[in-house]
Amino acid sequence: MLQPVTCSGCGSSLPREDAPRGACPKCLIGLAIDSVHGGAADPAPGLDPLEALGERVGPYELVDVLGEGGMGVVYLAEQTEPIRRRVALKLIKLGMNTREVLARFESERQALALMTHPHIARVHDAGATREGRPYFVMEVVPGVPITEFCDRGRLGLSERIALFVQACGAIQHAHQKGIIHRDIKPSNVLVSEEEAVASVKVIDFGVARATDRHHSEHTLFTREGALVGTPEYMSPEQAETDGRDVDTRTDVYQLGVLLYELLAGALPFDSRELRRGGLDEARKRICTQEPPRPSTRVGHLGDAADDAARNRKADPLSLRRALRGDLDWVVMKALDKDRARRYASPNELSADLERHLNHEPVTAGPPGAAYRMRKFARRHRFGVTTAASLLLLLMAFTVVLALQARRIAKERDRASREAEAASQVSRFLVDLFEVSDPGEARGNTISAREILDQGASRIERELAGQPEVQARMMATIGAVYRKLGLYEPAAPLLQKSESIFQSVLGEDHPESIRLLLEMGELRVAQGKLADAEAVLRDALARARRSLGEDHPTTLSCISDLGATLHYQGHLAEAEALYREALEKRRRVLGQDHPDTLETVNNIAATLYAQGKPADAEAVLLQALAGRRHALGPDHPETLDSVINLCSIQIALDKLAEAERACREAVDQGRRIRPDHSKTLISINNLGRLLELRGRPEDAEPYYREALEALRRTLGDAHHDTLWTMGNLGDLYTSQGRLAEAEALLRPAVDRVRKAFPREHLVTGYTLRKYGRLLTARAQYAAAEKVLLEAEQALGAAVGPDHAQTKKAIGNLVELYEAWGKPGEADRWRARL
């Protein structure tokens, strides 16, 4: 029979996990202090923390550096005896063995030893080196900061609150053990995930203060004039120089700051502004200035509000609405300057959050009857709905006639207003097109562009007193500019029109949403993809809210958002949106509607971008046949499908068929829209095709023509411009014209790094072309670095089996063969 093991310090029986150490966690502290002059060897005094790796501290071998704070270094360590396991070992820094720092470190060891909670890192051991540097050993916490985990997973508000409640439970347990954390912030609240279940661990009680002085005869007091903690998360009483008023409600305040950041995506006080004025200014601001409510803070984030909302599966407007009320009240109660008005404990804070999730009244909210009635209605929806229905039926007879009369009058007024607006638009257009009358033109040829320019200049002057008519004319001319590929004059007209519609008709009016959609399409055409995504997500949210899921404008928003994500390299998400739009457009609009055929065309383009050219060709041929039948062979949308077919057939090595498609697209495009980006893409494609067919001297003029026009119309940073620069630069490399290739490819690499994510098709494509040039110049080390980056970018963006990824691997094989490294060449060749 096994004999029970007792603690060498207090004589109590030990659980199995503590038996190898011979003492309970609390007594380990005293044993460690007694062993200061006979402890483990000190790992390489005076060296950088990384240089201590491989050294031993007692039975622990230092494997890696996990983190470094103000007073200690945390190592990943391997315990070899009496059991084998990986642990986190925190060792006081060299040169930090002042009495205060030693006392603070001892305080953290005691704090951890006292606490046993599933959401607090467990202490395993404690000791000291021969030189007197204390250390303690705890479980390895593999998680990431709670804010990073939530943003990475795009967790909604309720999911974030559920994780936060776990952290509240951990801090409550610490308070019950007489410990105040005093440094609660995201990096000290880690989240790990196991079998799809997320779990919080609170770490780093390094600045903890015991509420019971018996926990340490060296109880740490805040040194006069210094701040212990992190300013952005510091409570008013913690910011005071003496720190005498710090109690458990300090942790409640810091939990409030953490909750604020989790919900709103920003801190109550901007970090740069808080630290800009120095220590005294930071104290003053923390102690006297009231932070804005979370919902208000979101409204002042500017462009960052879109990212914050997207990370919470919302748009900025709906996020602000979700925060107003309960969550604003809960957060602001936790952040009250007066401790007496805060929650008394973390448990009270988490209980209010759970009431919010259960649609019950929160204690932080106003106690008004209307508020409590709303909460009652949320909890008892069926009964309240039934009662309300009966009440409405009783009231219906008394109001129905009045409503009908009002509706008829409203419709009559609207019809009259629409008729007057249509008459004004008609008169304006008649006047505008009189410039093409022979008597007015006087023998000169008047182009469509000149008519548009004259119309745009007259709108501001002649329609200033008729905002709705003015907005419609601006929208019409701006849309025509965009379709002609004239993006620069289109932008101000569409922006002004959208602003007028919002102020006159409201943001959820169909005209306002259509203008927002037009603005998104313009941003896509300009290559401003991040702006386009934000605009289109806003338009889609408004359309779903006010027009419904199956409205044609809603479906256009879904399709255009898919196109934006496609261009940004988010191909799987783009394809899902396209297929959603296709299913609804077939049902609502019909199989042969132009919008339905556009969606089929887009699905084909996405399949091609994902490295599935055969599947893409089969889908695209359906779209092309439908467009030729419904729109005719000369329609711009038909030509778009022809251009896409050319690219796909090049990838399938159907070069003769691809050349026929390319020449058709170029000839028709030059005739009906010579400067449009789609025409210029077809000219680039024809150059590429001729190069592949062994006619580089014929390809060069097409590349030059396309590049010159793309630079003029779209600018040097547009993805179509960069793609064409890559093609022409690569042609020069193949011809040995290396200086000319460098002049194109080096600037292209610089621009693509600024304008596109690292893991993007255009990024990988441009880097691949530049790496091939460096190989030709025998700059092998530089070429290796660039080509490895290109292969990683393409693999992440379009997958390891995509043609562009395979070409990058082939370029690496060519590099290593030229470099005289056949082993490396064979290793990469095996992946082809």
Image: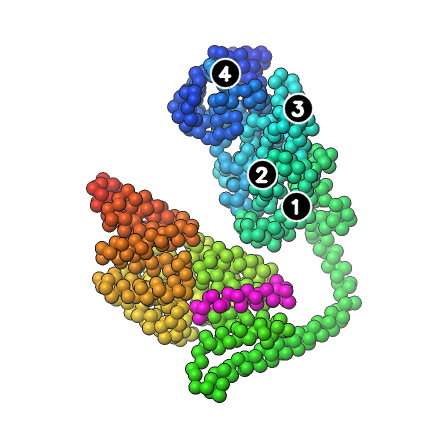
Mark carried by residue 132: 4
Left or right relative to 681: residue 391: right
Q: What secondary structure is marked by label 1? A: loop
Mark toward the viewer: 3 or 1: 1
How far apart marks 3 and 1 lie (CA) works out to 32 Å
Q: Mark 3 highlights which residue?
A: 211
Q: What element carries label 3?
A: loop
Which structural element holds mark 4?
loop
Marks 4 and 2 sit apart, C-alpha to C-alpha, by 35 Å
Q: Which residue is labeled 2 in the image?
A: 275
Residue 93, how many percent across, how many down? 49, 24
User: Magenta residues, as a range?
Assistant: 482-507
Residue occupied by mark 1: 292
Inspect the image, locate mark 3, and give the three-letter code of the amino acid beneath it: Thr
Identify the mark nearer the N-term, 2 or 1: 2
Horizontal and vertical percent position of residue 120: 56, 29
Which residue is pictured at 27% across the width and 48% down the height? 774
Cα–Cα span, label 2 and label 1: 18 Å
Q: Residues within 10 Å of mark 3 (few under 14, many from 20)?
A: some
- Neighbor class of circle 4 (other Cα within 10 Å; few <14, some 14-19, many 20+) is many
Residue type of the residue flagged with mark 2: Arg
